[in-house]
Image (cartoon, rainbow, N blue to C red):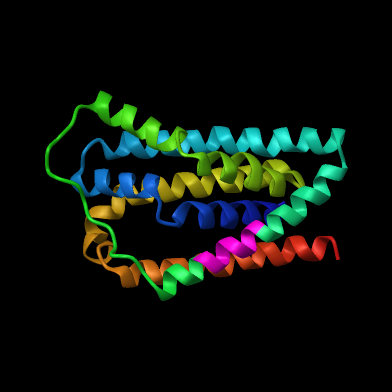
Amino acid sequence: MWQSYFNGFSLSLGMIVAIGAQNAFVLAQSLKREHHFPVAAICALADLLLIAAGVFGMAALLREFPQVAEWARWGGVIFLTAYGTFSVKRALYPGPGLEAEGAVKRSLGIVVATTLAVTLLNPHVYLDTLFLIGSVGAQQSAPAAYAAGAASASIIWFFGLAIAAAALSPWLSRPSFWRLVDGLIAVLMWRIAWGLFQNGA
């Protein structure tokens, strides 16, 4: 059970931590202290629902069509290997870092609507949660523990950003910080890809 939990936690955390539109938005809101806790809650809740749908929906699909498991396994190996490789590229050739947006405060309604748009209109969210995390979770010995691990990683990450962004702002603005993060992501992605590969060996 704990191995499944750790697999879900590490895979979800590796997917979430990479710099993207959602993380940039959460960081900006947190650095400005502009409704940052509601933003973190929305992002975590969306991940929780999508992860659960992916894990248990894929489990039902695999029971109905067992051959899909093999396709999903090799798809996961290829995707995770490529994802880790791109993380290494970002670590070697970092971008300019992240900066907070302007100081103009917006209403809670506007911030909530923007958060939902950034979260739900991003096709990578569905690829990551419904397909990748879901297909790996459906093959775990304890899918519920895996889903709990993946969801807890999301909760810890988004609320961690909301709480710590102000204190970490001098480092978050530096590309060197994200070089380290991307290097760790690569290790996590390759470790899980190797585990999937060994399951079919």
Residue occupying the point 33% across, 65% down: 95
Q: Is residue 140 visible?
A: no
Location of residue 71 in the rendering, given as x and y in whole percent from the top left corner: 79, 49
Residue occupying the point 33% across, 45% down: 26
Left/right placement of residue 162 relative to residue 3 reads left
Location of residue 10 in the rendering, given as x and y in whole percent from the top left corner: 58, 57
Does residue 84 belong to the magenta stretch?
A: yes
Left/right placement of residue 29 relative to residue 118 reads left
The majority secondary structure of the magenta stretch comes to: helix
Magenta region: 79-86
Location of residue 28 in the rendering, given as x and y in whole percent from the top left corner: 26, 47
Image quarter for residue 60? top right
Query: Is 151 rendered above or below residue 184?
Result: above
Image quarter for residue 65? top right
Location of residue 100 in the rendering, given as x and y in whole percent from the top left corner: 21, 51
Q: Nearer the viewer, residue 38 or 93?
A: 93
